[in-house]
Amino acid sequence: MVSMAAPRKYPDELRERAIRMAVDARRDPTGRAGAIKRIAGQLGINPETLRGWVTQAEVDAGDRPGTTTEDAARLAQLETENRELRRANEILRRASAFFAAELDRPHR
């Protein structure tokens, strides 16, 4: 079963542009203070949304500790696979117990 991600509120192009602008502004000591709030206002984005994007971009670039987008996707994939394997193992365990009980029953 494939789950569909929720549609994105902002286009990828806007997201990438906003991240670039915010990262560049934060590198400049004179424009660093309030950079995210200012850029978010200019682009019509919620400042906390932009802050999250920038934080994740910094993690993905290795500039900040945390779980990268790639690692998070891989972890989600492994968790799904693990759930499926546990379910399959439970089915096999029950089937094995059922057939073992059938073999133990006296037959006429």
Image (cartoon, grey):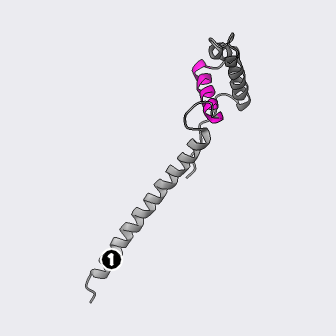
Kind of element beneath mark 1 = helix
The quarter of the displayed image where residue 24 is located:
top right
Question: Front-most of 45 and 64?
Answer: 64
Which residue type does callout 1 highlight? Ala
The answer to which image quadrant residue 11 occupies is top right
Front residue (pair 86, 68): 68
Point 61% across, 19% down: residue: 46
For the C terminus, the quadrant is bottom left
Image point (64%, 31%), residue name: 57
Q: Which residue is mark 1?
A: 100
| Residue placed most toward the observer, 100 or 28 | 28
Q: Residue at x 67, y 13 (%)?
A: 29
Above-or-below relation of 101 to 38: below
Is 69 a magenta residue? no
Residue 33 lies, in percent from the top left, at 62, 11
- 103, 47: nearer the viewer: 47
**Neighbour class for label 1 at 10 Å: few (<14), some, many (≥20)?**
few
Range covered by the magenta-colored residues: 46-61
Can you give x and y, in whole percent of width and height, for residue 15 in the image? 69, 27
